[in-house]
Every structure is written in structure tokens, then in C-alpha cells.
Image: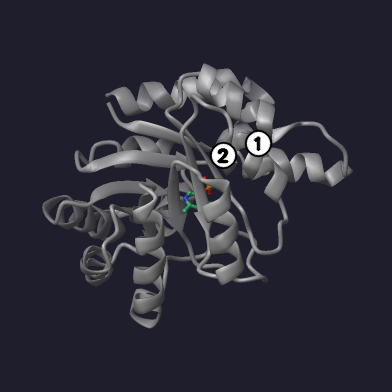
Amino acid sequence: MKRLGVNIDHVATLRNARGEYHPDPFQAAKFVKKSGANSVTIHLREDRRHIKDLDARKICSIKDIQVNLEISTRDQIVRNALKIKPNFICIVPENRKEVTTEGGLNLLKNKNKIKKIIKLFKNRKIRTSLFINPSEKDVKISKDVGADCIEIHTGKFANLVKSKKNIKSELLRINRCSKLGFKLGLEVHAGHGLDYKSTKILSKINEIEEFNIGHFIIGESVFNGFDKVIKNFKKILRK
Ligand code: PXP
């Protein structure tokens, strides 16, 4: 059974659209757990466009919920994350102008910095993950810098599935990286842009242990309800 992490950033996006309190990401986090997902993912962006510091602190204080906090490599964000004490962190690239996380980390450029950040969190027994493109070179660097997990960016693959284009070579890249990651002792995760169809295809890759899915779940919940959508994903991941 693969694990499902539900990214609730866009519950905050919806709340922030009105500048008020509803819908509350803290309530959403509790709901995610009740619906049977394994963890909650939140991204504390440098521009705080969705999740705010107080949301992150409140959500991480819920005792029986595993929280995966996505952060950039900025010193201030790293300091905040150390204070917030999530269960897991996932280091992601961040670019102020992007609509969403557009690609994986540039590991070659940021190797030393990332290595130091990983050490800080590992010393506090916080699981560390790196959001990477499906590149075997990046899988190897992830191992070198001491990460516990890799999360493979599935955005390109998901878009190919949505536009009914040929997925063969991108699927092969994800498959090869998953197998290499597993062989090197890294836990393999996948995420970005996933919907039912793309998740179903990737769920056949044995080495992927965790899926982190956000935008589609929140959007689809408008039609089918949060609980039902989470349960549908759990069903897909059970097979
Ligand atoms: N995983 C990571 C590392 C991400 O940055 C994101 C987007 O914030 C997701 C998963 C979820 O992507 P989506 O919202 O497209 O499902």
C-alpha cells in the first residue's frame, strides 16, 4: 500500500482570496487525516502566498498528523522551519514569479548548501526529502548529500497524460530514477500535477512509496467532496 500525502496549500489560497478565515487549512489538515490519508503537505513559500507561518505552526502542533513541510533553501525559511518542527521536510526550488514549483532543484549548483540544510534537520530527527527532476544524476547527488528521500517531479509526465501525448520516454525516466533511488537506499516519492489517471499509471512503479498530491484534490473536491476524493486516491494507491 503506497502512502498518500495531501497538499492543502490551496485551501489557504481559497481562504486568502477573501482575506478571512474560511476555509481553514488547520481544519483541512484534521479532515485529511480523518479521510485516511497518511500525511499533510504544506509549502511555506517565501512570499507566503498561501500557507502562513501561523498555519504551519498550528498544523504541525496536531499530535497525530504527520506533516511534510516544503521549504526553499533560503536561510530565513530554514530557520522558521526548524522552529516549526514538522515531521518531514522537502526542499524545493522557489522562484517568486512561478505559479507553482516548476521543476526540481538545481542540485549541482546548490549541493553544499543543501547538504548543510539536510544535516540541520537530520540532527533533529526530521526526515529529509529533495524535490528533483527525473534525472539519474540528480538521484545520485541526492544520495551524496545525505537525503533520506527523493520526490520525483512528475509535472511533465502529468501534462503529457492530460494532453494525451506520448508518455513513454518520460515514464521510462521516472521508472529508472525510482529504481535507482530504491537501489541506493533512498525512499522514493512522486508529486506534482497528478490526477487520477497519471497517479494510476505511476502507482504501478513498485519503488514509489509516497505520492504528494494537491491541486487536483482540492479542485475535484468542489464536485465530489474532500473525503470522497481522498478515498478515491487511496483506492488507486491500494492496487
Ligand atoms: N510535491 C511538491 C514538492 C510540490 O512542490 C507540489 C506543489 O506545491 C506538489 C507535490 C503538489 O503538486 P500539485 O498541487 O500539482 O498536486
- Rendered location of residue 130, percent (x, y): 37, 59
Circle 2 Cα neighbour tier, 10 Å, few/some/many (<14 / 14–19 / ≥20): some
Taking depth in this image into account, of 210 and 84 the one nearest to the observer is 84
- Does dot 2 land on a helix, a strand or a loop? helix
Query: Which comes before the other along the chain, label 1 or label 2?
Result: 1
Query: What's under tag 1, amino acid-wise?
Result: Lys
Q: Quadrant of the C terminus?
A: top left
Q: Quadrant of the N terminus?
A: top left
User: Which of the two marks, 1 or 2, is nearer to us in this view?
Assistant: 1
Residue 165 seen anywhere in this rendered image of the structure? no
- Residue 216: which numbered mark, if any? 2
- Residue 58: which numbered mark, if any? 1
Residue under the image location 27 percent in, 55 percent down: 174
Q: Is residue 84 above or below residue 31?
A: below
Taking depth in this image into account, of 77 and 205 the one nearest to the observer is 77
Q: Is residue 138 left or right of residue 64?
A: left
- Rendered location of residue 156, percent (x, y): 42, 59
